[in-house]
Image: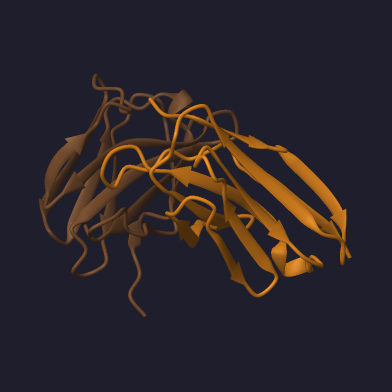
Chain colours: A orange, B brown
């Protein structure tokens, strides 16, 4: 089945620093979703990317889909303590079925 | 504010006991997913349904796990007999089939501990 590698597994930053997580696949993806899971919480949908080279922004979060549709990234500018959590990428495999990456756990020093 | 609900939120049981987890998808959603999350394996898809029909349960250990949707408002995941390695958080998620992959809305999860 389709698998993705997410890096890094863990990232610790000082509040105010930027953060980036990457999602890489060996195969071309039809689309990819990003989710955030707060500690003790459940995954919450952030965004879906569909088009090659697509860039979407949500306030301090910037999502990119690679030109070849084999990788994606999430960049957070000037992190805040509310950004703490695990960020998952999830490409689709067939209709509706998501395959979640291992996630990047972000911790922040206030 | 529509949400996926799951019961129970926490379950502690002894090895060999039957465990039943329930999920109420968001009204109007026609796809339901069961995931298991552990530190070691991450978030694994166990099974999913569309319009109450099971589409894929390849991620589920068939000998002890079973998933059903008795009606559109209820999905169940059963483990019989349970084993300590089944200890995990089990999430249910629902979505609505569209032209492309739709958003999945996760429930709060059932934290299962098998002693």
Q: How many discs appear? A: 0
Residue at image point 46% right, 29% down:
A27
Left or right, residue B104 beside residue A90? left
Q: Which quadrant does the N terminus of chain A fall into? A: top left
In-front residue for pair B79/B34: B34
In-front residue for pair A33/A85: A33
Q: Position of residue A40 (x, y in %)?
A: 59, 55
Q: Position of residue B41 (x, y in %)?
A: 53, 29
Left or right, residue B19 beside residue B12? left
Residue at image point 27% right, 52% down:
B22
Residue A84 visible (yes or no): no
Q: Which quadrant does the C terminus of chain A fall into? A: bottom right
Q: Residue lying at the far top in this picture: please name it.
A: B63
Residue at image point 52% right, 40% down:
A68
Q: Position of residue B10 (x, y in %)?
A: 45, 51
Q: Quadrant of residue B9?
A: bottom left
Q: Position of residue B111 (x, y in %)?
A: 47, 46
In-front residue for pair B23/A66: A66
Residue B54 visible (yes or no): yes
Left or right, residue A18 beside residue A50? right
Residue at image point 30% right, 28% down:
B60
Q: Is residue B102 above or below residue B45?
A: below
């Amino acid at each position: 089945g389709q698998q993705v590698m997410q890096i890094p597994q863990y990232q610790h930053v000082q509040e105010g620093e930027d953060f980036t997580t990457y999602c890489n696949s060996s195969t071309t993806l039809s689309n990819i979703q990003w989710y955030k899971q707060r500690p003790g919480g459940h995954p919450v949908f952030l965004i879906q990317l569909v088009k090659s080279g697509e860039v979407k922004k949500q306030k301090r979060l910037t999502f990119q889909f690679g030109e070849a549709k084999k990788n994606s990234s999430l960049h957070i500018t000037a992190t805040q303590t509310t950004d703490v959590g695990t960020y998952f990428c999830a490409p689709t495999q067939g209709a509706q079925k998501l395959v979640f990456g291992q996630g990047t756990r972000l911790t922040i020093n206030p | 504010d529509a949400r996926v609900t799951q019961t129970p939120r926490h379950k502690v049981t002894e090895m060999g006991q039957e465990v039943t987890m329930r999920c109420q998808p968001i009204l109007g959603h026609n796809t339901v997913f069961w995931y298991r999350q552990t530190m070691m394996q991450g978030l694994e898809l166990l099974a999913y349904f569309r319009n109450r029909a099971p589409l894929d349960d390849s991620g589920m250990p068939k000998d002890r796990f079973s998933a059903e949707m008795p009606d559109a408002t209820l999905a169940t995941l059963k483990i019989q007999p349970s084993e300590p390695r089944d200890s995990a958080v089990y999430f249910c998620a629902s979505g609505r089939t569209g032209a492309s992959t739709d958003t999945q809305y996760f429930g709060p999860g059932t934290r299962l501990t098998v002693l």
